[in-house]
Image (spheres, helix red, strand yellow):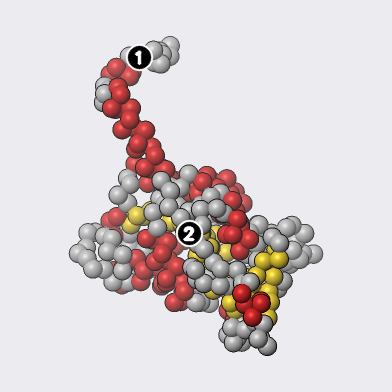
């Protein structure tokens, strides 16, 4: 769609399109959309400089519901289109909206390369651990044993961990948040928007129809404190209803320990989070902490600065111009690399 120019500051209402939002009642996508509009309105970026690119899936409808520029592309190809757009128009704020099926199955290769290149785009991966739009097949992130209409005996596949994939691809910003944790979701999206480089955010998102309640351990108020570690830079990993448990390393393996009864030794050994560590070892370990064996991490696992893909390409172009001059298109066409097709 082509938004008309509006004066800043924007409101969430300014960013709402005239399209009917067509997700199932109770879908976690509603929460993400509402928070995203609030965050975008606070960025001070005009609507005409906001672009959302999606692939195919329930989450990929989101560009229709924002009064900004948007593309719904081919299945899994959103990172590729977004990369090309950012290179030709670096002034734009480019976001990718994808799901665990779209982004990690047919789109997995495109996602990896956008992250490793450090293209300055923001990638939101809605993870409901199921193929929702195609009526409930298991996805790359579905847990072993997940029963679906297409797989009534249960999945035998080892699930893919989105954060582990992003860390392995050397993404410079990697985070996880949850659809119904509005405050945390808001702050995570703000930080992703502010990051210079490839920002990857996994959002646990409930599919009310085909995989309802898969994240109850992380959303139910009665138990989530015992099952999640909220990461804070420079702070030890502490969790639990009364913050009486922590995470330390035993060799290269994280383990949960009790901090009660004056267990000073355990408290002194707790793992301290360092999101700015250029080495990916810590972020990788955190990405592999999985319920119920260990509490799962939410928050920013990694946030480092390195030159973006656009900066490196621009540097090469500037160097070539310095050495060879700006060049002429006619000379290029008439050069040795041209040929005639008869």
3D distance between C-alphas at marks 1 and 2: 48 Å
Give residue 21's position: percent from left, percent from top. 43, 69
Mark nearer the N terminus (1 vs 2): 2
- Which quarter shows the C terminus? top left
Towards the viewer: 64 or 49:
49
Q: Name the residue located 35 percent from the left edge and 55 percent from the top edge.
A: 93
Regarding mark 1 in the picture, which secondary structure is present there?
A: loop
- Say left or right for 191 vs 133: left
Which residue is label 1 attached to?
335
Can see residue 111? no
Give residue 36's position: percent from left, percent from top. 40, 68
- Which quarter shows the N terminus? bottom left
Towards the viewer: 26 or 173:
173
Q: Residue furthest right?
A: 153
Give residue 17's position: percent from left, percent from top. 34, 66
Q: Name the residue located 58 percent from the left edge and 77 percent from the top edge.
A: 238
Q: Quadrant of residue 11?
A: bottom left
Q: Quadrant of residue 240?
A: bottom right
Towards the viewer: 296 or 252:
252
Regarding mark 2 in the picture, which secondary structure is present there?
A: loop
- Say left or right for 266 vs 187: right
Disc number at residue 276? 2
Q: Is label 1 or label 2 in front?
A: 2
Q: Name the residue located 63 percent from the left edge and 61 percent from the top edge.
A: 285
Give residue 266's position: percent from left, percent from top. 66, 76
Disc number at residue 176? none
């Amino acid at each position: 769609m082509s938004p008309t120019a509006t004066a800043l500051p924007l409101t969430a209402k300014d960013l709402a399109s005239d399209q009917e939002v067509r997700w199932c009642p109770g879908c976690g996508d509603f929460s993400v959309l509402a928070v995203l509009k609030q965050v975008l309105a606070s960025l001070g970026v005009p609507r005409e400089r906001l672009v959302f690119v999606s692939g195919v899936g329930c989450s990929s409808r989101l560009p229709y519901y924002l009064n900004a520029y948007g593309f719904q592309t081919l299945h899994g190809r959103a990172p590729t289109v977004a990369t090309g757009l950012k290179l030709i128009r670096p002034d734009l704020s480019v976001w990718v909206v994808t799901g665990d099926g779209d982004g990690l199955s047919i789109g997995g290769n495109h996602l990896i390369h956008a992250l490793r290149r450090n293209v300055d785009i923001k990638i939101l991966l809605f993870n409901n651990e199921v193929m929702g739009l195609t009526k409930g097949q298991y996805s790359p992130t579905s847990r072993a044993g997940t029963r679906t209409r297409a797989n009534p005996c249960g999945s035998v596949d080892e699930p893919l961990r989105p954060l582990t994939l992003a860390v392995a691809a050397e993404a410079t910003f990697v985070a996880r948040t949850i659809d119904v944790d509005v405050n945390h979701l808001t702050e995570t999206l703000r930080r992703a928007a502010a990051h210079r480089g490839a920002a990857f955010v996994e959002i646990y998102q409930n599919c009310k129809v085909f995989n309802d309640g898969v994240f109850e351990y992380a959303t139910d108020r009665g138990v989530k404190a015992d099952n999640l570690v909220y990461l804070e830079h420079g702070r030890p990993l502490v969790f639990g209803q009364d913050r009486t448990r922590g995470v330390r390393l035993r060799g290269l393996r994280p383990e949960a320990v009790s901090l009660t009864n004056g267990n000073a030794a355990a408290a002194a050994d707790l793992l301290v989070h360092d999101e700015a560590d250029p080495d990916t070892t810590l972020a990788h370990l955190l990405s592999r902490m999985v319920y119920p064996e260990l509490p799962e991490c939410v928050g920013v696992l990694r946030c480092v600065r390195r030159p973006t893909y656009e900066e490196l390409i621009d540097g090469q172009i500037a160097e070539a111009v310095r050495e060879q001059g700006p060049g002429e298109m006619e000379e290029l066409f008439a050069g040795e690399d041209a040929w005639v097709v008869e």
